[in-house]
Image (cartoon, rainbow, N blue to C red):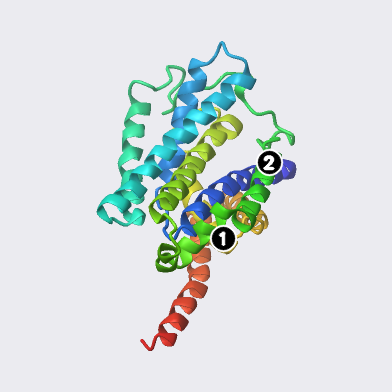
Amino acid sequence: MNLYYLGQALNLSTLYMVGSLAAIFAIKSGFFNLGGEGQVYLGGFVTALLLNQFTKLPPLLAIPLAFLITFLSGACLGLISSGLKNLKGTDPLFTSFILSCAIIPLIDGAIAGPFRTSRGNLLATDFIANKFRFASIMPPSNFNWLIFPILLLCLLTYFFFEASSLGRKITISGIAPKFSQYAAFNNSKILDFSFTISAGLYSLCGGIAVCGTYYTCHSGFYSGLGWNGLSVALIACLNPILLIPASLFMGFLITYSNKYALLTNLGFDLSSLLQGLILFIISFPIFKIRLNSNKRRGL
């Protein structure tokens, strides 16, 4: 049983790594992407539908193709938010959240209606074929080999922001948009790129959850993945390297708090309480920075 919870914590941490990378790309550009929950849900839904259609294809072809389409589907949502900012000046924080709130009930309706599985009473799509499921490396948990490419992705993202011209432009544009404008940076294209990558990664997180954890897209599976990914990004101070231990911290915290609540028969959601407490604590450095900035301006 202990091995099971250890594996589940590591598996959840893997999903948080992808979600926090998605959050980092948006925040680095100067705006929050609050549509993570809906984007994760969309990614899981698209992945489940595609893999149920790709049953005759080999996994080495079907899974990358499904993930590519899943990434692009989420990227379209991000592009809508950034496009509205560039065209109408609307804050992507609000538009991303509103789009998420709109798409969640649509997917709920699709799962409860035409795409609902005929096997059993679960509000979910059909289960994907066994050949598309990521094999566990720590049975009976769902912890799988995908942790290794995701760790590599964290390292590559770090070097992208630290060593590449585009990565530095995104960071500068987010910190000092007026300066980047005077430096002839194309802030509109930078925002488009950052938000499409952010939303695409959130959707990819949903696809990974379907292939490695749930093997179907069931109603509500996305819960916590978007907001906790944002929490991990803030805990890690937007550092793609630090988000690895931050994701592990959050994954173990959520898994073992749920285990404790289950074994002790608590009447409230302990993990949600702890998540709220963490978000409350990490908000103080942000407030302190803003306060010091206002003092320097004489406000």
> What residue is at 63 percent from the left and 48 percent from the top?
13
Using the image, tell me which numbered label, if any, was put on residue 47: none
> What residue is at 68 percent from the left and 46 percent from the top?
151
On the image, the x and y values in percent for residue 9 come to 65, 47
> What residue is at 60 percent from the left and 20 percent from the top?
61
Classify 267 as above or below 204: below
Q: Nearer the viewer, residue 265 or 171?
A: 171
Secondary structure state at the residue bearing disc 1: loop
Query: Which residue has dot 2 on it?
Result: 147
Q: Is residue 108 visible?
A: yes
Tell which residue pokes out farthest to the left in this image.
88
On the image, the x and y values in percent for residue 15 come to 58, 44
- Residue type of the residue flagged with mark 2: Ile
Crowding at label 1, few (<14), some or many (≥20) Cα neighbours within 10 Å? many
Tell which residue pokes out farthest to the top in this image.
56
Using the image, tell me which numbered label, if any, was put on residue 238: 1
Q: Is residue 282 left or right of residue 247?
A: left
Tell which residue pokes out farthest to the bottom in this image.
298
Secondary structure state at the residue bearing disc 2: helix
Does label 1 or label 2 sit earlier along the sequence?
A: 2
Classify 42 as above or below 82: above
Crowding at label 2, few (<14), some or many (≥20) Cα neighbours within 10 Å? some
3D distance between C-alphas at marks 1 and 2: 20 Å
Q: Nearer the viewer, residue 48 or 276?
A: 48
Classify 260 as above or below 110: below
> What residue is at 36 percent from the left and 33 percent from the top?
107
Q: Nearer the viewer, residue 273 or 169?
A: 169
What is the quadrant of the N terminus in the image?
top right
On the image, the x and y values in percent for residue 249 come to 64, 57
Q: Is residue 253 left or right of residue 139?
A: left
What is the quadrant of the C terminus in the image?
bottom left
- Residue type of the residue flagged with mark 1: Leu
